[in-house]
Amino acid sequence: GQQLNQSPQSMFIQEGEDVSMNCTSSSIFNTWLWYKQDPGEGPVLLIALYKAGELTSNGRLTAQFGITRKDSFLNISASIPSDVGIYFCAGLVGNMLTFGGGTRLMVKP
Amino acid sequence: DTGVSQDPRHKITKRGQNVTFRCDPISEHNRLYWYRQTLGQGPEFLTYFQNEAQLEKSRLLSDRFSAERPKGSFSTLEIQRTEQGDSAMYLCASSLSWGRETQYFGPGTRLLVL
């Protein structure tokens, strides 16, 4: 089946640093979504990307839909302590979301 | 709050018992999805409904699992004869079937089977 490879698996950074994470796949997706999940909660949508090459920002977050439709990245600028959590990429084809394994972000004040 | 809601948030049960979870989607959303998430992994698709019709089921959905959405609004997910391997977070999401089909998730039901 389809698989999304998300990297890095975890990051431990200093407050104020920029963060970058990405997802790659052997399959093409029509939509890429980025979610953040806090412990014991459901994923919260951060950014949705609908077109190859699309670059979208949401505050300090920026994400891009790769030209090949097989990859996406998420950047967080000037990280703050509340950015801590697990970030998931997800690709949509048909009606099913396929999730990456997540990037656990830890921010040191 | 007009987001996706799930009930209960936590459930502890003994092996062999049946459990039922409920999901209320965002009111204007006609598509509803169930996912399962185990510790340290991303969510995995189980099944989805468009209105009251169940249109797709994953191979993960064994015969002990059944989902319904009788009136095209809320949905229930039942697990019969629970096993320890069923312990996971069960997530519900909803979306519209036209335009941009972005899925919005509920808070999840965490199941622990003893």
Image: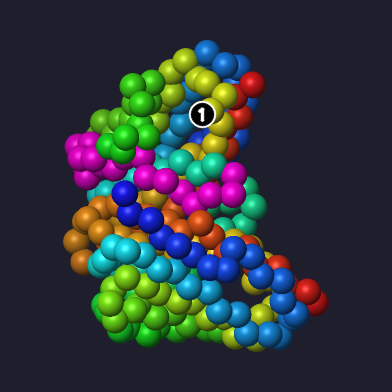
Residue at point 45% right, 76% down? A73
Query: Can residue B74 be seen by looking at this rendering?
Result: no
Residue at point 32% right, 64% down? A26
Lateral position of residue B23 relative to residue B38, left or right: left
Q: Is residue B83 magenta?
A: no
Query: Can residue A65 be seen by looking at this rendering?
Result: yes
Residue at point 42% right, 46% down? B44
Residue named by callout 1: B86
Q: Position of residue B47 (x, y in %)?
A: 31, 40
Relative to the observer, which residue lies in front, B107 or B15? B15
Q: Position of residue B27 (x, y in %)?
A: 33, 51
The quadrant in which residue A72 appears is bottom left
Q: Residue furthest front?
A: A26
Dot 1: element: helix
Lateral position of residue A106 relative to residue A9, left or right: right
The quadrant in which residue B113 appears is top right
Q: Is residue B54 magenta?
A: yes
Q: Position of residue A57 (x, y in %)?
A: 45, 84
**Figure colour scheme:** rainbow
A32, above or below B14, in the image:
below
Report the quarter where the C terminus of chain A lies.
bottom right
Which class describes the residues within 10 Å of circle 1: few (<14), some (14-19), or many (20+)? some
A83, above or below B25, in the image:
below
> Label 1 is found on which chain of the structure?
B
Specify the segment rendered in magenta. Answer: B39-56
Q: Residue furthest right?
A: A109
Main SS of the magenta segment?
Answer: strand
Residue at point 35% right, 77% down? A65
* Tag 1: amino acid: Asp
Lateral position of residue B72 relative to residue B91, left or right: left
A1, above or below A59, in the image:
above
